[in-house]
Image (cartoon, grey):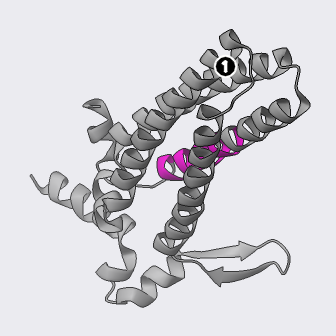
Amino acid sequence: MKKTIIAISVAVFLAFPGIVLGQGSQGVQQQNKVQDPTTHTATPQANQNQFQIQNKGENTQLRTTTQFMQQLMSMEGLEEEVGNKVQALAQEQMQAQNQIQTQLNKLESKSSFMKKIFGPDYGAIKNLKQQTEQNRLRIQQLTQLANQVQNKGDETQLQEAIQAMTEQNTTLQEQIQVEEKVGSIFGWLVKLFN
């Protein structure tokens, strides 16, 4: 029993040294300092602010990709077979955008305190990984279709949509990596059930 209490106390101390030592938010700020590569000095950076900035960029990326998908759905002048495939892929991507936004909201809604204890929302991370893989497959299909298009304007429009989807995937993968690196006390246990 004593060993368990000591182990839990050590884990809490390691996770929240500022709070345990009575330093409050100052201790947390000290933990969140990162080294600026240009000046080689430590500067404070709150994890929550970092996530909000990244999420704002992700929301912009989602809107941009959605706009391109809406444009693809309304493209005219494509050969019937190519046009149907482009519209089907654009429709799939629009549905994926909603699912991606839902998963990002789940990640954002979990407080940093809960993340420190139980880790990020591993179910949302798993779903985002699946979505990025599906995006990758749609990007491949659109690339093949862009090579079949005769009109340069249509090809350019497809290439812009492909670029937006590629950038979104890169951003999602970076977000997943950030979430997976969150240190937590019982995250290993939660992972067992996901």
* Image quarter of residue 122: top left
Q: In the displayed structure, does residue 29 sit left or right of residue 3?
A: right
Q: Residue at x 48, y 51 (%)?
A: 179
- Amino acid bearing label 1: Gly
Q: Main secondary structure of the magenta part?
A: helix
Q: Nearer the viewer, residue 172 or 42?
A: 172
* Image quarter of residue 117: bottom left
* Image quarter of residue 115: bottom left
Q: Which residue is mark 1?
A: 83
Rendered view: 73 above or below 181 = above
Count every numbered label the image shows and give the total. Answer: 1
Give residue 142's position: percent from left, percent from top: 71, 23
Q: Quick one: quadrant of the C terminus?
A: top left
Give residue 165's position: percent from left, percent from top: 66, 39
Q: Is residue 50 magenta?
A: no
Give residue 116's position: percent from left, percent from top: 35, 61
Q: In the displayed structure, does residue 44 sit left or right of residue 25?
A: right
Q: Secondary structure at mark 1?
A: helix
